[in-house]
Image: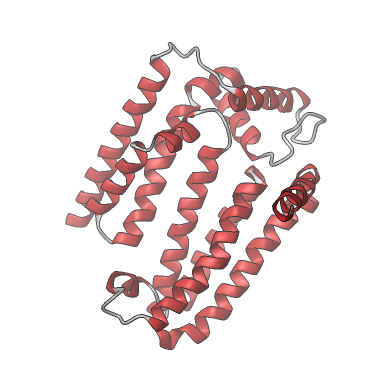
């Protein structure tokens, strides 16, 4: 009960802080603000609503998810997409950030106080707040990445306690979040999957090599070395399925995003030169 009360108080603090932050951002300019991405996605959403489809000539090529989300907000509130994007979206972005941040940090740190401090530090990061307050896809991508980390952490904890079905359930939820993230922006999802592909095996290797006393907090949340033989194949399959979901969205569900392969090739060519 005490833990539940602490969590409720912590969540209330964060919700109030995020709401005040978003209100100041909007009211400072009387709601009359915009920037490039905000205007682009407002126009894309207006076009999507007018055509009644996510597939129309001027759709954003890297993902349809934000236009679909903003269309839903617009229809629910009765506001036009530009107004909803400049008045409602900033509140959503700030609240999504602190709630998902608190959820992820709470599962990692096992402390409500540490999670609150971590989430408040997110509010104190100007570049991050610019990303979640403006009217583009980044607020949703960041939220889904933080929730994905939460699901992976809970999956690790379930596997450590030999709860196989619990592990599978959290993996399933994680894959749903991966699909949602892929539909919103292919590059953001690919960047997260690259980090996951490299980081997870590296962390598991460190837990095998380093003494338990060096990484005591980390060791509490990850399986011990005797469990790694069963964990590594599961993580390999999970990572492969994540990449498969991203490719499915890009190649079959939303073909316009396949144009991103050309841009990725251009980036690699520039790096090689």
- Location of the N terminus (image quadrant): bottom left
Quadrant location of residue 96?
Answer: top left
Using residue 44 as the reference point, say whether residue 202 is left or right of it.
Answer: left
Q: Is residue 1 visible to us here?
A: no
Quadrant location of residue 122?
Answer: top left
Q: How many marks?
A: 0
Instruction: In the rendered view, tell whether residue 58 sits above or below residue 169.
Output: above
Residue 90 x %, y %:
46, 28
In this view, which residue lies farthest toward the right? 57
**Front-most of residues 260 and 75:** 260
**Front-most of residues 131 and 211:** 211
The image's colour scheme reads: secondary structure
Which residue is found at the position 50% from the left and 12% from the top? 32
Residue 256 x %, y %:
79, 42
Residue 70 x %, y %:
59, 30
Residue 166 x %, y %:
46, 71
Using residue 177 as the reference point, say whether residue 161 is left or right of it.
Answer: left
Quadrant location of residue 206?
Answer: bottom left
**Front-most of residues 267 and 138:** 267
Q: Is residue 205 visible to us here?
A: yes
Instruction: In the rendered view, tell whether residue 7 sits above or below residue 54.
Output: below
In this view, which residue lies farthest toward the front? 273
Which residue is found at the position 35% from the left and 71% from the top? 221
Using residue 153 as the reference point, say whether residue 197 is left or right of it.
Answer: right
Instruction: In the rendered view, tell whether residue 76 sits above or below residue 31.
Output: below
In this view, which residue lies farthest toward the left? 2
């Amino acid at each position: 009960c005490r833990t539940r009360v602490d969590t409720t108080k912590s969540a209330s603090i964060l919700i109030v802080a995020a709401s005040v932050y978003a209100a100041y951002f909007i009211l400072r300019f009387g709601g009359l603000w915009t920037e490039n991405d905000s205007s682009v996605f407002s126009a894309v959403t207006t076009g999507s609503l007018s055509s009644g489809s996510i597939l129309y000539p001027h759709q954003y090529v890297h993902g349809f998810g934000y236009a679909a989300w903003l269309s839903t907000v617009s229809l629910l509130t009765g506001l036009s997409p530009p107004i909803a994007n400049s008045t409602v979206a900033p509140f959503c972005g700030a609240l999504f950030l602190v709630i998902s941040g608190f959820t992820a940090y709470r599962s990692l740190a096992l402390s409500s106080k540490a999670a609150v401090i971590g989430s408040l530090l997110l509010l104190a990061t100007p570049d991050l707040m610019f990303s979640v307050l403006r009217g583009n896809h980044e607020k949703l991508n960041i939220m889904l990445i933080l929730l994905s980390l939460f699901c992976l952490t809970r999956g690790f904890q379930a596997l450590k306690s030999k709860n196989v079905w619990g592990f599978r359930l959290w993996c399933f939820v994680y894959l749903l979040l991966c699909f949602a993230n892929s539909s919103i922006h292919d590059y953001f999802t690919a960047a997260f999957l690259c980090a996951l592909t490299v980081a997870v095996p590296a962390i598991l290797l460190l837990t095998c090599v380093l003494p338990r006393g060096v990484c005591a907090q980390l060791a509490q949340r990850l399986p011990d070395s005797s469990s790694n033989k069963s964990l590594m194949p599961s993580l390999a399959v999970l990572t492969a399925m994540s990449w498969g979901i991203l490719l499915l969205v890009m190649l079959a569900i939303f073909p316009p995003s396949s144009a991103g392969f050309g841009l990725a090739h251009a980036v690699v060519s520039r790096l090689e030169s």
